Amino acid sequence: MRLSRYFMPILKENPKEAEIVSHRLMLRAGMIRQQSQGIYSWLPLGKRVLDKVNAIIRDEQNRAGAIELSMPTLQSAELWQESGRYDAYGKEMLRIKDRQDRPMLYGPTNEEMVTDIFRSSVKSYKDLPLNLYHIQLKFRDEIRPRFGTMRSREFMMKDAYSFDLTREAAEHSYNKMFAAYLRTFDRLGLRAIPMRADTGPIGGKLSHEFIILADTGESEVFCHKDFVDFDIPGKHTDFDSVEGLQAIFDKWTSLYAATSEMHDEAAFNAVPEGDRLSARGIEVGHIFYFGTKYSEPMGAKVQGPDGKEHFVHMGSYGIGPTRLVPAIIEASHDDNGIIWPASVAPFDIVVINMKAGDQACDDTCELIYAALTKAGKDVLYDDTDDRAGTKFATADLIGVPVQIIAGPRAVANGEVEVKDRKTGARETMTIEAAINRFVA
Ligand code: P5A
């Protein structure tokens, strides 16, 4: 992508409305724009990161056996009247009438709709287990939308829903998502700790929130500090192994970890003082087991091996991609801007032409840009006629992991500089060596 043809509206000044660093940097880097309170457009640079986050989430959902579909954002109120949540959900639900005066709503979550899909076609235990997910916009009319896309009114959610014949089978489904979440957040460059949490309007008695420790987080959390170094399940994890997944779950729940709503002071005080971590955190995921809470009132049942009908046991599993992007920035930035983990960086490499219009610089940059693009890298080429200082500041701000800098003096020697955004380390090397380093 040539920067001169791209749309990346960088802000020079710090936006006043931004209270936390991620919100400030997302606005400054031209990643998002607020359209009305708590409702955002994702501009091209932000969209690239969001797409990469979603690709990792999708990959791990698929690995764990979940199946992707797509459900609409607008839902009929009737479904919610069946489950009894239409009245219970309160003012957070945006209620709308269509031209026939039929009550509709902008979905804050999809337990009812997916239960309806399930009951219309699944009739036998032989079709279980089943886990259906989508990545879709949600709307919650939050009282206090804030911190940009961290807590917005319209936001994206990956929501998965599992269906099983028995409680035991449902626990295995829960453990699959539990392990998939550990892997997902790890691939996003984050350390997320599962903590016992309040189930709120989703319901049930068992749930875990996945929390990223961060001073700007909205949740108050308490946990054993060893979680920070626990091993993440590897990519060859067997998601069909009941014992294997149970062992992962048992290990990751063996020590104290709870959000403030579930906090048990006495249990926490039993943790040796030096091991106690009392901190703030960002909730990036939340998984639930709620048994037959929806299947009973909505009549979602299957025939079991005993020939009788059984209400299915369900769980639901949410991740917030539009919250994850600022959470990653909270965890990874410096005074100059964002430092993207390679897995979600909007571009892999930025090529900076320090003197656009200079034939040697232009030729060198074009050569590098073409070679790296051909090798399948996402390359941003800063071919604008801005000052070199402005280009460096922009490259640092948008956080691309590698910068290849071509200035007249180096280029005259057949060389360029390669800078690592994270460490700031710079290395001068031949043009060929710079290309080869990233083409391998
Ligand atoms: C689980 C999937 C649910 O809604 N039903 C379907 C369950 N869970 S939840 O905890 O309420 O939300 C899941 C995740 O969505 C993100 N999230 C938000 N992100 C941005 N702005 C918001 N206002 C917002 N509300 C929820 C969080 O990551 C949460 O863990």
Image (tube, rainbow, N blue to C red):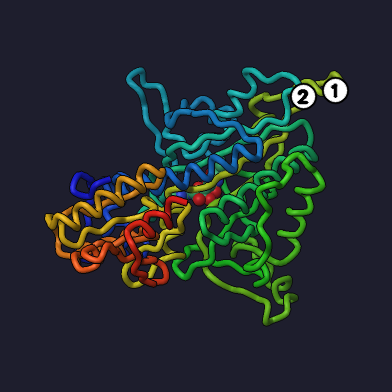
Q: Is residue 33 left or right of residue 89?
A: left
Location of residue 362 in the rendering, given as x and y in whole percent from the top left corner: 19, 53
Q: Quadrant of the N terminus?
A: top left
| Residue receiving disc 2 | 125
Q: Residue at 37% of width from left, 54% of height from top? A: 435
| Residue receiving disc 1 | 305
Residue at the outermost right position: 306
Q: Is mark 1 within 8 Å of ligand 1?
A: no
Q: Is residue 317 left or right of residue 106?
A: right
Q: Residue at 22% of width from left, 46% of height from top? A: 7
Q: Regarding mark 2 in the picture, which secondary structure is present there?
A: helix
Q: Residue at 51% of width from left, 25% of height from top? A: 78
Give, as a three-letter code, the residue at label 1: Pro
Q: Residue at 53% of width from left, 28% of height from top? A: 69
Asked if residue 259 shows in the view, the reply is yes
Q: Quadrant of residue 414?
A: bottom left
